[in-house]
Image (spheres, coloured by chain):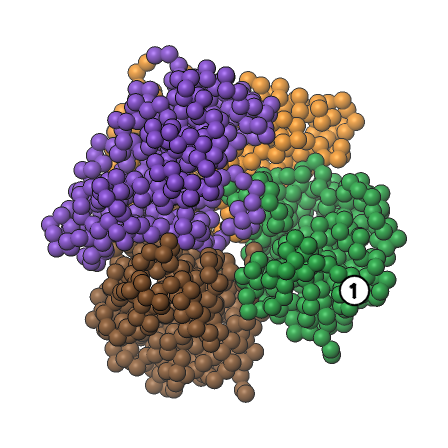
Chain colours: A purple, B brown, C green, D orange
Amino acid sequence: MSVIKAAIVGGTGYTGVELLRLLSGHSQVEVSAITSRAEAGTPVTELFPSLRGHYDLKFSAPDVDELARCDVVFFATPHGVAQAQVPDLVARGVRVIDLSADFRLQDIPTWEQWYGQQHACPELAAKAVYGLPEINREQIGGAQLLACPGCYPTAIQLGFIPLLEAGLVESSGLIANAASGASGAGRQAKTDLLFAENNDSFRAYAAAGHRHLPEIEQGLSQVVGGNVDLTFVPHLLPMVRGIHATLYAKLKNPAAAEATQEALQALFEQRYQAEPFVDVMPAGSHPQTRSVRGTNMCRLAVLRPQGRDTVVVLSVIDNLAKGASAQAVQNMNIMFGLNENQGLESPALLP
Amino acid sequence: MSVIKAAIVGGTGYTGVELLRLLSGHSQVEVSAITSRAEAGTPVTELFPSLRGHYDLKFSAPDVDELARCDVVFFATPHGVAQAQVPDLVARGVRVIDLSADFRLQDIPTWEQWYGQQHACPELAAKAVYGLPEINREQIGGAQLLACPGCYPTAIQLGFIPLLEAGLVESSGLIANAASGASGAGRQAKTDLLFAENNDSFRAYAAAGHRHLPEIEQGLSQVVGGNVDLTFVPHLLPMVRGIHATLYAKLKNPAAAEATQEALQALFEQRYQAEPFVDVMPAGSHPQTRSVRGTNMCRLAVLRPQGRDTVVVLSVIDNLAKGASAQAVQNMNIMFGLNENQGLESPALLP
Amino acid sequence: MSVIKAAIVGGTGYTGVELLRLLSGHSQVEVSAITSRAEAGTPVTELFPSLRGHYDLKFSAPDVDELARCDVVFFATPHGVAQAQVPDLVARGVRVIDLSADFRLQDIPTWEQWYGQQHACPELAAKAVYGLPEINREQIGGAQLLACPGCYPTAIQLGFIPLLEAGLVESSGLIANAASGASGAGRQAKTDLLFAENNDSFRAYAAAGHRHLPEIEQGLSQVVGGNVDLTFVPHLLPMVRGIHATLYAKLKNPAAAEATQEALQALFEQRYQAEPFVDVMPAGSHPQTRSVRGTNMCRLAVLRPQGRDTVVVLSVIDNLAKGASAQAVQNMNIMFGLNENQGLESPALLP
Amino acid sequence: MSVIKAAIVGGTGYTGVELLRLLSGHSQVEVSAITSRAEAGTPVTELFPSLRGHYDLKFSAPDVDELARCDVVFFATPHGVAQAQVPDLVARGVRVIDLSADFRLQDIPTWEQWYGQQHACPELAAKAVYGLPEINREQIGGAQLLACPGCYPTAIQLGFIPLLEAGLVESSGLIANAASGASGAGRQAKTDLLFAENNDSFRAYAAAGHRHLPEIEQGLSQVVGGNVDLTFVPHLLPMVRGIHATLYAKLKNPAAAEATQEALQALFEQRYQAEPFVDVMPAGSHPQTRSVRGTNMCRLAVLRPQGRDTVVVLSVIDNLAKGASAQAVQNMNIMFGLNENQGLESPALLP
């Protein structure tokens, strides 16, 4: 097979450098361009010395003609950017994988409300495929415009899906208590994100409403075929990578045979048996974020504490990997008919 | 007033050194003994150089006669130790403040089940006063044996109390998602607690059942005058000090005037108006653990995300301070008729 | 004695909030104003919730007349700011304590070379007193304009002084390898200072020349009465507070009786015997930065590894405390004839 | 080529799990056994869930016959263990790569003095090859018993070698100020290594004499063909992985053309031009430990601050990778005639 020519738009952030890291080990992809207006002309390795010896690229100003010569273009940009550039690329037959939030929500008014701006190409949003392979693998294969899920939505949906598909829990009153490493906030010069502001401290943020809420509810609603109602509180961890979601759902029928600890364990194992990147841990496990660091893996544990009516799911991913760039590579592999775990095989760095 | 003579039993752990730190600034207390079998004869400042210039004490082997000459004895020991030594001291008229779990539960079978051993003096447990001043100040004043609350129970009870007292939320299906700094696990040489095992990682632990669960349920049951049912999942943070509890409760009557965001804020402010160590933050705040580091303060925020049926409370304390040693000093102040915030007035170290 | 009225200019940074923390526990000082152009009108506790309950102040725009009504004005500003405002205040009889670099160097061309701008009031610089009490206590007492030493210069000078005063080591070829917590870089929104850029990583910076080099060499030259030549390499630690300096000097006469490990220990103990804020640790100690966290203490250890010709000194301070705000308070205490350790008595927060 | 059969003795520590991680991506090696007396029977993935899906192995009790059927045996054991088992394996023709200190020193009395025990097989120590490929590649190719360098010795020797080989600096009075992440202390349950003891703090240790000192001096003495005299002070960083060494050496002839900043830069670039795992950074760089995290790379920068007589070298490695397990794999590749960077090609995980 010939090599896939890829470009990355907006490559100076953390999802950009993570794409470069992962693609450097992907034998069937060549990164031919990486764009940044601010850093045009700067060698990639000057900004990211960890890539010395792996790339000779310089950042370049975005050039649609150059991008259009690629097989696939990754957008690793803030929301609002992809919308402006994607229609042209799609029209010219390029396949686009957008890591931003631009095409994640199918309801445009909801998108516009949460992101505070008008959507530039609603008609294209309707055609975008939501890139969570565990529920959407077939459509991903044929996608021309792929919307990569957010980091929290990935961890949270994967944890709730087995329970909701099986109809075991109430779809209202769901609770997702989640915490993310600081890299989730991106590589932005903000006082709130300084080392001295975050080390040895912990706090919630956006507790009244986070932009990932409608995305999660959209996904889970499709799973149950109806409304879901979720309370989602994100927190900021004094660490770099990793998301840990602790999920709570109320059993519809606590006395049912399907609701025992053993049955719940079996349900999760069965649901994800064939999934290369979802690992159901043994009963009683407490997955650690570091066990998935740098990988495309989601590790889950399910339990029913004290045999009461609330089921708890623990879900961990790496926000920059399965929560962004590695999942983007997984989607690319599916879109181009490659081995799904190509470039995604290394175990986590531990300790 | 004459100086209060205090002793600390089991002083080599984190709650012991925190007591020493706080009492070094307390003008009406003198620490006359600090015991440790393992370190008997070692100067306190050899183990804790931060106290150089503040104490000349050496650790000593526990000696009941010496302890009995004190006005107050703090037990900063693992569970099971205080039970064996307290009866003698109490009989000799010494006032005892136990920071361990030995006298927190009034139901002895429950204690024995969760702590896996027989209780040595059930009759004394019945007389112990639970030292959460915000619900128990009067009894604390007259206590001879005071049981200091656990760290999680302090943060979680203070967050739920206003809602439960006002009868606004269901008392079943309560959820407490909490996270603690590593000092909460104590100064024990365990592989799981190593720096290299915990830095840059995050995980839940004891999700199926933590020993603080019955303590929290006991306290909240007394508040509502009936059963409460709580799901409590603790997590281990890559930081040293601080507990953050994120609490979820279901409104009984979401349409009630008492259930608006404004009414909830007013309820919390009113409930804790006179409390020197509970600070209700302005609506929309996200309290940080570092804002209470080293202090006896609990900071709370209450909110009703998206106007839905679930109320969220954010509660932060320092696990070693309000969650242990500083609350012990607050209790001592009350027991001895001192100014309640004597020795507890310094603001948090920030950043 | 009547209360001293103090103002803080530029109070939104870390040295500003540290001054507020320390002065809240100083019984003879009242902070009457804290200025910030950017935050004028904002309550101090909105920016720093850790101070809730301790201050009712709002940030105000700087107003010379208001400042002139104070007994003492602290400048916690970037370099260049104090120069513009101090002359007026000094002329009106206010005592000024400058925490910035504006008046630390007596050689104006050197200042201008390292700070890249013209000095606004060279004549005043000549009258400024360098506020390192351990070598300058008498002049500090009479100072009207006090220049607080930099953080690295404090840790490094205190470590070298005994050796240089005693003439035991060569004054050329001195080496100071130092490392600072991230708070030393201030509360500035810079990408390089983000949590995700610094956690779990370590690096040198400004190795070719740091602005504290001429300050250290100026101080040590005065000690030896001649030139000193120092190589100084600072590093950035993945932690918030603390400076650790590891100092290397070559013995002039390795065989001398004054050069044994025991003699070196005695030399250091004797030199700092009367100093309230320098603690010479027992031989063989390795002082930790956390043992001085939040305090005005400098802890030192001296050793002669393997009995060879190089003496090593380990020196730790808290960069925001003895390296900035606490040393400013110590200087204020001396200037106003107060007890030198007023407001500076609390032991470090540990763990 | 047929697959190389490897075993790991003492696999429950950090160098053991790092070997497993690296070898999982090495196409020409199969790990057939991993031993641990304490964990015999436990699946490797139970101790290290990050390896789930990568290994089916269980820890086994060491069995010489089984080890003897392997092509290569890695010892990832505390010092003293390999000595007892290696002679038998070597006699049976197995190639051994020892990551411990057992065979690093050629002078047996020196070894016995620093490690406090008698050496079990001095005659074999004489035949061991020291595995620093940058000075020893040829002998490594033919080694049957390979002694992997210590972590500090690797970082420090690579930094000093160009200067000493070129005879530019004095070989006495060398200074190595180095700092290591906590994983360097291993996975041992010691109070000193707890998270709560090390986070947000920094300190030196073993400043009077560290076991790596004689190893470094042995290596550098061979480079200069004579005595070297080094002062080496290690420090413990509040992070997991990484060593940063800051090296100081005195120029013999500061005025020489070879001693300019440009000439020093050229010297380093030329010395390591052909080395796959030593990266000389551009002049003015400050290499970060995270830029080599998880990789076999050593990044160096050389500078002459202020044009004075002291040359400074900054050297970073990952203590578990180039400082231990990855260098072991590099050595194995050389010993078995494989591509030297097989299994070692992934860039660092950043951020």
Q: Could you tell me residue A89's position as x and y percent?
A: 44, 21
Q: Could you tell me residue B335's position as x and y percent?
A: 43, 82
At 54% from the left and 62% from the top, the residue drawn is C50
At 68% from the left and 68% from the top, the residue drawn is C31
Q: Callout 1: 10 Å neighbours few (<14), some, many (20+)?
A: few
Q: What quarter of the picture does the N terminus of chain C occupy?
A: bottom right
For label 1, the residue is C65
Judge from the rendering whether residue D56 lies leftward or rightward of residue A24; answer left or right.
left
Q: Could you tell me residue B338's position as x and y percent?
A: 50, 82
Choose between C143 and C72: the one closer to the eye. Answer: C72
Q: Could you tell me residue A98's position as x and y percent?
A: 41, 30
Relative to A246, say whether A120 is above or below. Answer: above
At 83% from the left and 47% from the top, the residue drawn is C119
Q: Chain of mark 1?
A: C
Relative to A344, say whether C52 is above or below. Answer: below
Relative to C200, say whether C136 is above or below. Answer: below
Q: Does residue A345 show up? A: no
